[in-house]
Image (cartoon, rainbow, N blue to C red):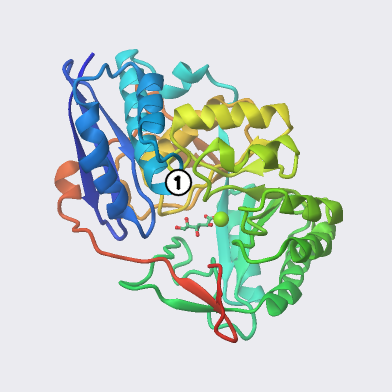
């Protein structure tokens, strides 16, 4: 089966999404997510101007060879833009292969390991009281696992506290908006939130928290220790993770489980973290980690070291990634949990899909492929609109991590 054409579709149903559509000479097509929040057009160009010309004429079934061609052939390896582009092509080729085999993608990967995929939702609020109430709302919606984020006294805004309770879109401006950060205020406040949550709801639900890259390893050790009585499912992105051995320091001080990796783009970004058991969950997901072909390697490495998957699943990853991830989650033996930040109704209209949420779990359908499509006519109605993720500064103006 030959690839005869491919195109990049940029659409903005409330936020920007980039999609590649690959067409074959047997009439089958596949689609892949190429969305990189705040840098969407860089990936669109990487595909249109650099990868697609090399794709036409190739055998659509040679998924691994095409992956190796684009990874090794670039000379300039790794990085979020290139690996997101490779991931998009990889997702589309797996979609085609599963359609050609007339089976849902999870069957092609190795069949079902579980009936449903446990997900976690995002409860947030400006203060502890509102956040506690939001967690209660998610419990009432049937979630077994809930991430809790709340505002910090004295800070005008903070990561994870959205204007719209159901959807969280951090890329909020035509140029980067500037947030302010205060580590001491944050570290003093977070344990109070989880103490209140456990006092209110007990220990029957998993609670998660995302630090969003803002501590040093010793600060993360302190926070992890302070949170131990509240038994978190995980503490996410406690530190920026370029220094993988920095997690040794965190591990020395706390048994709170650690998750990291949504910003990683290859197995090399997490090899030491996994092989030294410095983390418990790897968050790297299909769209930014090089596709299904690459994530299979990461999941198999993780399996050797008791590390489980915990895919990133934010609103700014398209429903195509969510669909492909759910097929992967349904198969992968060392599954941990799947993030599920719902998409807006207009996004779901552009990307019709067969997965559905029931009582705290997502369930894939049995449509051949990854079960997600794109309505090109509708997509064309939503023009790209430049949007940046915020930046963060400390109170004294020092540039910091958002
Ligand atoms: C977050 C994301 O979902 C998460 O865990 O870290 O909201 C992240 O901030 C966005 O995906 C960035 O675009
Ligand atoms: Mg995160």
Name the quarter where the N terminus is drawn.
Answer: top left
Residue density around tag 1, few if under 14, some if 14–19, many if 20 or more, within 10 Å:
some
- Residue 73 or 6: which is nearer the viewer? 73
- Position of residue 282 measured from the top left corner of the image (x, y, whole percent): 62, 42
The correct choice, above or below, for 221 with respect to 372 in the image is below
* Picture residue at 30% right of the left edge, 15% below the top: 100
Would you say residue 232 is visible in this rendering?
yes
Residue 198 as seen in the image, left or right of residue 238:
right
* Picture residue at 25% right of the left edge, 39% below the top: 50
The correct choice, above or below, for 49 with respect to 201 in the image is above
Would you say residue 353 is visible in this rendering?
no
Query: Image quadrant of residue 280?
Result: top right
- Position of residue 295 measured from the top left corner of the image (x, y, whole percent): 52, 32
Query: Image quadrant of residue 192?
Result: bottom right
- Position of residue 40 measured from the top left corner of the image (x, y, whole percent): 31, 54
Query: Image quadrant of residue 92?
Result: top left
Q: Is mark 1 within 8 Å of ligand 1?
A: no
Mark 1 lies on residue = 79
- Residue 210 or 129: which is nearer the viewer? 210
* Picture residue at 78% right of the left edge, 50% below the top: 248
Count of numbered labels shown in the rendering: 1
Q: Give the structural element (helix, strand or loop) at label 1.
A: loop
* Picture residue at 37% right of the left edge, 66% below the top: 388
- Position of residue 199 measured from the top left corner of the image (x, y, whole percent): 79, 65
Residue 372 as seen in the image, left or right of residue 275:
left
The correct choice, above or below, for 364 with respect to 204 in the image is above
In the image, farthest residue toward the front: 75
Residue 192 as seen in the image, left or right of residue 3:
right
């Amino acid at each position: 089966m030959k690839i005869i054409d491919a195109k990049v579709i940029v659409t903005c149903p409330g936020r920007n999404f980039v999609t590649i559509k690959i067409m074959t000479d047997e009439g089958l097509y596949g689609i892949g997510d190429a969305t990189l929040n705040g840098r969407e057009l860089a990936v669109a160009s990487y595909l249109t101007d650099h990868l697609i010309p090399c794709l036409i004429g190739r055998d659509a079934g040679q998924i691994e060879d095409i992956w190796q061609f684009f990874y090794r052939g670039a000379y300039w390896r790794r990085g979020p833009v290139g690996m997101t582009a490779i991931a998009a092509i990889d997702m589309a080729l797996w979609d085609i292969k599963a359609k050609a085999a007339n089976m849902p993608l999870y069957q092609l990967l190795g069949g079902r390991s579980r009936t449903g995929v446990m997900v976690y939702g995002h409860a947030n609020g400006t203060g502890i009281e509102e956040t506690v109430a939001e967690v209660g709302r998610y419990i009432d919606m049937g979630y077994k696992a809930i991430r809790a984020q709340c505002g910090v006294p004295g800070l005008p805004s903070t990561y994870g506290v959205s204007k719209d309770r159901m959807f969280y879109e951090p890329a909020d401006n035509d140029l980067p908006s500037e947030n302010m950060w205060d580590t001491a205020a944050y570290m003093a406040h977070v344990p109070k939130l989880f103490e209140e949550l456990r006092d209110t709801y007990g220990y029957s639900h998993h609670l998660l928290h995302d630090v969003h890259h803002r501590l040093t390893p010793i600060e993360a050790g302190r926070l992890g220790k302070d949170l131990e009585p509240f038994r978190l499912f995980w503490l996410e992105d406690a530190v920026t993770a370029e220094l993988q051995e920095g997690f040794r320091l965190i591990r020395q001080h706390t048994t709170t489980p650690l998750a990291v990796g949504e910003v990683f783009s290859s197995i090399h970004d997490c090899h030491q973290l996994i092989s030294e058991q410095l983390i418990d969950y790897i968050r790297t997901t299909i769209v930014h980690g090089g596709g299904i072909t690459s994530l299979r390697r990461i999941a198999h490495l993780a399996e050797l070291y008791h590390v489980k998957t915990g895919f990133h699943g934010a609103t700014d990853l398209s429903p195509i990634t969510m669909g492909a991830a759910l097929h992967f989650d349904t198969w992968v033996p060392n599954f941990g949990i799947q993030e599920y930040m719902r998409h807006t109704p207009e996004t779901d209209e552009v990307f019709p899909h067969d997965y559905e949420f029931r009582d705290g779990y997502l369930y894939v359908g049995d449509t051949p492929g990854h079960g997600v499509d794109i309505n090109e006519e509708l997509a064309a109605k939503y023009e790209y609109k430049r949007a940046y993720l915020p930046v963060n500064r400390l109170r004294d103006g020092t540039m910091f991590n958002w």
